Structures are given as C-alpha cells and as structure tokens.
Amino acid sequence: MNIHEYQAKELLAKFGVAIPAGYAALSVDEAVEAAGKLPGPLYVVKSQIHAGGRGKGKFKELAADAKGGVRLSKTIDEVRANATDMLGNTLVTIQTGDAGKQVNRLYITDGADIAKEYYFSMVVDRKAGRVAMIVSTEGGMDIETVAHDTPESIQTITIDPAEGFQPHHGRAVAFALKLKGDLNKQAAKVAEQLYTAFMATDMEMLEINPLVETTDGKILVLDAKVSFDSNALYRHPDIFALRDETEEDPSEIEASKHDLAYIKLDGNIGCMVNGAGLAMATMDIIKLNGEFPANFLDVGGGANKEKVTSAFKLILSDPAVKGILVNIFGGIMQCDIIADGIVAAAKEVNLGVPLVVRLEGTNVEKGKEILANSGLPIVPADDLGDAARKIVAQVQKAA
C-alpha cells in the first residue's frame, strides 16, 4: 500500500525525523491558508499523487511550457495561482503513463536553502534476508540515471534485522555521503530514525530523494515516498486508515476485497492462475505466442468457489479483455472447485469472449467433467503450451 508524501512525512516526524513544516490542502483556499501558517518567504506547492517524477511532469490541461507538479512560490498570490493550476487537473509523469493522475490534494511546505542534495532509500533484500540502505551523494535525480552514469556513487549498507541498527551502520551511511563533523553525526542519527520507522511500521520501501544539507548546516528530509507490506497492514490500522482509494485502480480495489492478488496490465488476454510463479510463466507464454496478458491474477492456493467466481468476474469487467486463459495446478486447491467457480461466473456474466482452461492436479478429471457438461463454449487444453496457443488463436480469429 502506498501513501502520499505529506502522510509519509507526518509518519516519519513521529520517529524524530527532521522535515520542513508543511500542510495538506484539498482546495485553493486551504492552500492559501496553509501558506499563511508558514514563515516564508519561499513556499513549495507540491501535487500529491502516488507517482514519482512530479517536478518534471506536465499537466494535460495546461500549456506545454507550463511548470510541473512541484513549484516554488515567492508570494501568497503565487501559491494561489499554482494551486489553481494544479487542483483538479491531470498530471502526467514518467511513472503515471499517458493517462496521468488527477491532482486532488496539495502539500504546501516551507522552502529550504539547499547546499547539497543526497539520495537515501531502504528496501527488503529478500535474497540476503536483510534490510538494505541504499545511499548516494547524487540526490535529486532519478536513481536509475545515477546507477547508469555514475554507479560508483551508490553504496549499499545491509542490516541484519536480528542484530538491528548499530552505530557502525550510521557511520557507514554518513561516510558514504562524504559528510564530516556535525553533519556526519546528523546523518547517522537520521539513518537510525529512518530504520526504526521502517521496521516499526512494516514498510516495504522507503525513498528519500532528496535528503538535503541546508546552508545553515541541517540535514532535512525534503521528499518521502513510502509503501507498506500489505500482508502486515492488519497490525497497523492507523496506517491502513491513510489509504487513498482514489489513487488506485478500481479493479485492484475490488480485488483486495476478495483477497485476490490482481494487477491490471495493457494486454487483451485475461489470466486466472493459482501461484505467483505459475502466473508469471503464463503471462510469458502468452507473449511468446504473439499476444499480451491483460492482468496478473493469482487466486491463491486455497481459493473456494466464491473466490474463483469473484476473480472470473473481475477479469471480465475489463473491456480490453478479448479472451481468457485459466491455468490451474490443483495441489491444495481442487480442480473441481475451480471448475464450479468458472461455470458459475461464466453463466452469471453471460460469457462473450473465448475461454481456454487448463487444469491439472487434484480432482482434475472431475473438474474437466464439470466443464464439459456445463453447456458453455469452454476450450480444454492439455498443457500450458497448448493452452497459450489455443487462446491466442481464438483471440486473433475473433479480431
């Protein structure tokens, strides 16, 4: 689950992290009121959407040369003008795709006199079983660009969760950022505070870009991007309450209600699979045969008839879907239960696109019998390769 920048900063501030003063705003008047609470004379008006690259983004409704989604304002009148430009308009960034995202809220923050920008992030290194702190002296830029152009400027410090954050980790971060004296101590302290926040709230990713050194010798978090492990949100009802469903795909919201792992993609063949690895292989083989998957959908290992029905209806709710491939290996899940769910959903939504089903595993013969006797135009497949070839042929024939 992602949250907005202003929410992330408010959360980090609870762990002692130094951030500039700022206020969220849902209207132009609230933006002006927020600016009035700040000392000035420089204010920053920041669009709040779940996407990076806001500063370089463009608004669909504004002129091509208009400023991006993060703007400096030297007066209250400029705050009003910038807020008017942003609110209700669609910001397109490198991460939103061409559709962009509508800006429904702003963050008005106090300006900072920046001497130097740095990069700091944390992720879970699943292979190593550790938390990785990734730092660079080249902040304020896309980390991908830094990795390509100056990879030597990026350093990674890993922390064993069983050991926890130790003083040498803080020193390693500060030295990687080439900071000395009091700035060195501040950086080490901030690193510890961020690690504590990361672990205490079950974050999946934390990115600070930039982490800045001000001209008066302070280390500040100037931007924050945070996502949480959705499987751990039951432990954090306060964080779950920060969820902004207007920033999410409606299909993915519906999927979460039924505990389905669903991600909408740009193709035309819907996929329903049990198991993430099998789902990835299914999407790959669809592409190998000349078409593209419309979604990633993992119903899990213990789905019941109702869950399968919900998954099937979710796929069919996407108008881009021109065919469906169901690929199930019944281990814990039984093939006859899958078959019952498919038949029930297909009848309920009046199936109008080709459907290919490959079943294997527990109760597979019973499942195939249910499908064969359903009276529906379901195409059976012997294996994954056969299934992919058949659904691609069906879709291309109907095109």
Image (cartoon, grey):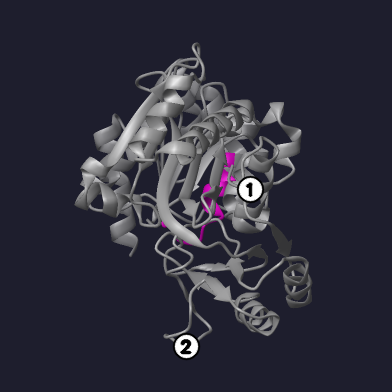
Residue 149 image position (x, y, % from top left): 20, 52
Left/right placement of residue 240 relative to residue 345 reads: right
| Furthest residue in direction bottom, as rendered | 63
- Residue hosting label 1: 9
Q: Nearer the viewer, residue 136 or 390?
A: 136
In the rendered view, tell whether residue 83 sits above or below residue 272.
below
Quarter of the figure with residue 234: top right
Amino acid type assigned to the residue bearing label 1 in the image: Lys
Kindly identify the residue that appears in the image at 33 percent across and 51 percent down: 138
CA distance separating discs 1 and 2: 31 Å
Label 1: which secondary element: helix
Disc 1 crowd, CA 10 A, few/some/many (<14, 14-19, 20+): many
Is 76 in the magenta? no
Left/right placement of residue 242 relative to residue 160 reads: right
Left/right placement of residue 5 relative to residue 239 reads: left
Kindly identify the residue that appears in the image at 40 percent across and 38 percent down: 180
In magenta, the rendered stretch is 311-323
- Residue hosting label 2: 63
Residue 213 image position (x, y, % from top left): 47, 51
Question: Could you tell me if residue 121 is visible in this image?
Answer: yes
Residue 46 image position (x, y, % from top left): 59, 66
Amino acid type assigned to the residue bearing label 2 in the image: Ala
Residue 100 image position (x, y, % from top left): 49, 68
Label 2: which secondary element: loop
Left/right placement of residue 304 relative to residue 241 reads: left
Q: Quadrant of the C terminus?
A: bottom left
Question: Could you tell me if residue 270 is visible in this image?
Answer: no
Kindly identify the residue that appears in the image at 41 percent across and 35 percent down: 174
